[in-house]
Image: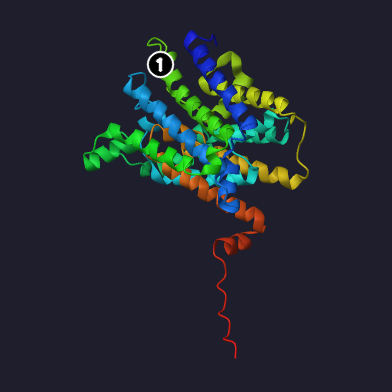
Amino acid sequence: MEETTATLSAFAVGLAGGLVLGLAARLGRFCTLAAIEDSLFAHDHTRWRMWVLAMAVAMLGVFAAEFGGLINPQKPHIIASSFNPLSTILGGLMFGVGMALVGTCGFGTIVRLGGGDLSSFLVFLVLGISAFMAASGPTALLHLWYLDPLAIRNELFADPRIHTVLAKLTGIGAMLVPPLIAAGLIAWVLAKREFRNRPGRLAWGVIVGLVVAFGWIGTGWLVFDEFDPQPIVSYTYIHPVGASVMYAMTSTSSQLSFGIGSVLGVLFGAFAGALIKKEWRWQTHDAAFEAKRQILGAFLMGTGGMYALGCTFGQGLSAVSLLAVSAPLALGSIWLGAWLGLLYLMEGSLSGLWRGVVPPRRSPKAPAE
């Protein structure tokens, strides 16, 4: 299919931002699962502070773009679609468990692939196929039959953004909320002296946040064409992975898109970053059981990410920057799922997982005579 100027422009915007994100992952060690793992088990919040800083910067960028009339934040699919808490929570849990089994998220899979990890190519394919299965295949039917009817379709969530819902409930000015939330997040991030003294971490957190805002502004304003409208999107790595696989097979009957550009951008950026850090090398699974675990994890990520309408990037950064009501639910569910998945891997069994979640009560010691 012939590419139009608008589709090529959207592809270029996705590619440019993806390149920077790939470099951020390799050079700045920007990684979601590592941030969760460090916070939960090592009590080190450095990477999570990077992530929260990116959230705040993206939020401020979107707020400025909306205030300046550059974008209409009600147009993105995650806002225009009905709010479905159960689907968001279930999808987030599935994604989190899958992320733990794979050892990284969808974004991290592309980053690893750019560094020469052949096992990530298998994860990439399974994730992409399962995402399209959840969009228009067998697992989409399960969602249609059992989860879609539970979506909330009332006036309160007609515009499912946190500040608009708060404005309806309390009457406070909706436009005051985003900068206040962003300021609170930045204050928490900078409260730690050790983090303030690491300018590299600060810089990459700010850069990632600016790239997320750039995605919304790029698709909502830079590539706007009333005769060839493009979806207003930002960076997410579930459906675009499937779209990239499909385009590779059917490019004569499909079109490039922002999502495909973002996937290629991360791949090329991660490749460049691996070369700069001298970390590029071929590697693959050490044993068959690792491949089985990662295939299952990739399926859970692809399916869960579609049910939750986003991944760690799509919900954790892009949707957060819009203050979508679904974002805290999705991100909390992903954290919980990742924690359970990591506990399972450490304990080695479901019974061990249960002991990790609910430690056995110790009998009180008998008093010394």
Judging by the rendered image, the residue that carries numbered circle 1 is 221
Question: In the image, is 163 to the left or to the right of 50?
Answer: left
Tag 1: Cα neighbours inside 10 Å, few (<14), some, or many (≥20)? Answer: some
Residue at left 46%, top 41%? 143
Nearest to the observer: residue 174 or residue 310: 174
Residue that extends furthest to the bottom in the rendered view of this protein:
369
- Picture coordinates of residue 139 (x, y %)? 52, 39
Residue that extends furthest to the left in the rendered view of this protein:
171
**Displayed quadrant of residue 266:** top right
**Displayed quadrant of residue 162:** top left
Specify the color scheme: rainbow
- Picture coordinates of residue 213 (x, y %)? 45, 25
Nearest to the observer: residue 43 or residue 364: 43
Residue at left 77%, top 31%? 281
- Picture coordinates of residue 189 (x, y %)? 47, 41
- Could one spot residue 154 in this view of the protein? no
Q: Amino acid at mark 1?
A: Trp
Give the position of the N terminus as an image quadrant.
top right
Element type where label 1 sits in the image:
helix
Residue at left 42%, top 40%? 187
Question: In the image, is 292 to the left or to the right of 160?
Answer: right
- Could one spot residue 213 in this view of the protein? yes
Question: In the image, is 305 to the left or to the right of 280?
Answer: left
Report how many numbered discs are placed on residues in the image.
1
Give the position of the C terminus as an image quadrant.
bottom right
Give the vertical position of 171 relative to 206 (above or below).
below
Nearest to the observer: residue 251 or residue 333: 333
- Picture coordinates of residue 179 (x, y %)? 35, 33
**Displayed quadrant of residue 103:** top right
Give the vertical position of 226 relative to 169 (above or below).
above
Question: In the image, is 314 to the left or to the right of 63?
Answer: right
